[in-house]
Amino acid sequence: MSSVQEHTPMEINRWSLAGTTALVTGGSKGIGYAIVEELARLGSAVHTCSRNEADLKNCLQKWRDSKLKVTASVCDVSSPSEREKLMETVKSQFDGKLNILVNNAGTAIFKPAIEQTMEDFKLLISTNLESAFHLSQLAYPLLRACGGGSIVFISSISGFIAWDNLVVYASTKGAMNQLARNLACEWAKDNIRTNCVAPGPIRTPLVDFLVQDEDLLAGEKHRVPLGRLGEPEDVAGVVAFLCLPPSCYVNGQVIVVDGGRIVNGNH
Ligand code: NDP
């Protein structure tokens, strides 16, 4: 038998996540909800979390009806002790093995720089950045136990370009992009790949104010060459790709999913 046949058996489906386990934070709404569904449809057993138990229960019912393998627990990712508890739950649920970590939970506070308080700053750092770092640390032994895996951070195009009223949020996302690059290099020896997905404006509850404001929405559509806001599924597909075997040589990258918004010079 040739070595090629030995190493690439035809029966392995490179576009399936069957037999894998995943943790997706913030899966009760928006982008996280779509990521949970995308990974579960590809065959992964997914655990997710958010702060609101009633929302999670509703989601779990929908996922059960769709025959998707999803579990959930309440966790505020801004709290170090709740992060530890979350990873203990994941560890016992998946027998100490995790293939995929998606650090998606995040929030924004829209204010001019001068009005952002130290409380705003601490909340954004702990929710968006510290949680992504700490959960990656906590997940590391579980990822290693699988012989490697994939970490995906959901950052934002605001990590590249300045938006009005988003100075602290944008800083957490810029830092997250570099966090991914560093982990990508440090943990490559363990066969753990780390990448970011950086969305432009996506139609979720987080940006309801934009969707509801006709002028703002028209301005945004004008800036996006594809002429529309993104949908959560547009992001979820790219996240899934970064977790699948065909992306096995993609490491330390920030993949922008914005309909061409930040490369558009025509606005
Ligand atoms: P949503 O507000 O629609 O959903 C956020 C999800 O995260 C919810 O499930 C929410 O549940 C959960 N969440 C929020 N804070 C916490 C917390 N402290 N602990 C645990 N769970 C939490 O946001 P999006 O789907 O729009 O955003 C998801 C990610 O994508 C964020 O990191 C955001 O920065 C990023 N992003 C979004 C863009 C957009 O235009 N929508 C653009 C670029 C990036 P609950 O509130 O009940 O806890």
Image (spheres, rainbow, N blue to C red):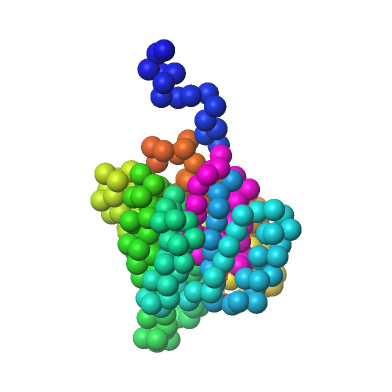
**Residue at the (38%, 37%) spot, across then down:** 249
Residue 235, given in percent of the width and then of the height, sits at 56, 53
Quadrant where the N terminus lies?
Answer: top left
* Front position in the image: 64 or 200: 64
Using the rendered view, name the quadrant where residue 115 is placed: bottom left
Residue found at x 44% / y 50% = 99
Q: Residue at x 55, y 42 (%)?
A: 18
Image x and y of residue 225, in percent: 60, 49
* Front-lying residue, 33 or 174: 33
Whether residue 172 is visible to the viewer of this picture, yes or no, is no
Q: Is residue 81 magenta?
A: no
Q: Is residue 70 left or right of residue 253?
A: right
- Whether residue 45 is visible here, answered yes or no, is yes
Q: Nearer the viewer, residue 190 or 219?
A: 190
Instruction: Please determine whether, in this image, residue 255 is positioned above or below residue 26.
Output: above
Q: Is residue 14 above or below residue 5?
A: below
Can residue 34 be found in the magenta stretch? yes
Q: Position of residue 183 (x, y in %)?
A: 30, 54
Q: Which residues are magenta?
A: 16-42
Q: Quadrant of ligand 1?
A: bottom right
